[in-house]
Image (cartoon, rainbow, N blue to C red):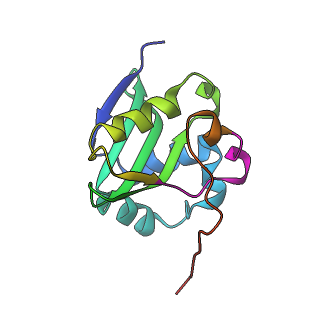
Amino acid sequence: MNIEYKLNKNITASEFIEVLKNSTLGERRPINDKLTIAGMIENADLIVTATIDEKIIGVARVVTDFYYCCYLSDLAVDVKYQKNGIGKKLISKVQEQINEKCKIILLSAPDATEYYPKIGFTQHNSAWTITK
């Protein structure tokens, strides 16, 4: 399997939606709201994609200041390609772009809570959210 990783590739809203759907992350993202999806892409600080033969099979989408905190808001890998180290590699590509002291922060999908400790993340029990 020849996977190519690309930094800040200009993906379209349709391509991003397809990866979200294929990864099951689409269940928790506004995939029927193309304007919001387009805004998510346009306003991300980093986007790393994993592709096979130009087909996007994985995406890491990040909002960050590059020095203190890095919010990994989306880590999506097509279910057909999961368990091949693609998510971990996408995260390492993000880490290459931020300061070594910068912490990666994420909110796990319910089905992925067992995955993150396996790749070095530590659970933090005091995360909070508010919706406008």
Q: Is residue 126 above or below residue 10?
A: below
Q: Position of residue 46 (x, y in %)?
A: 30, 50
Q: Position of residue 56 (x, y in %)?
A: 43, 34
Q: Nearer the viewer, residue 34 or 64?
A: 64
Q: Is residue 92 above or below residue 66?
A: above
Identity of the residue drawn at 35% across and 34% down: 93
Residue 80 counted in the magenta span: no
Q: Quadrant of residue 52?
A: top left
Type of secondary structure dominating the magenta stretch: loop
Extreme top residue here? Answer: 1
Q: Quadrant of residue 124?
A: bottom right
Q: Nearer the viewer, residue 11 or 124?
A: 124
Q: Nearer the viewer, residue 84 or 106?
A: 106
Identity of the residue drawn at 52% across and 87% down: 132
Query: In the image, 92: left or right of 22?
Result: left
Q: Position of residue 19 (x, y in %)?
A: 52, 42
Query: In the image, 50: left or right of 44?
Result: right
Q: Which residues are magenta?
A: 105-114
Query: In the image, 88: left or right of 44?
Result: right
Q: Is residue 50 above or below residue 132?
A: above
Query: In the image, 102: left or right of 122?
Result: left
Residue 108 counted in the magenta span: yes
Identity of the residue drawn at 44% across and 68% down: 36
Extreme front residue here? Answer: 101
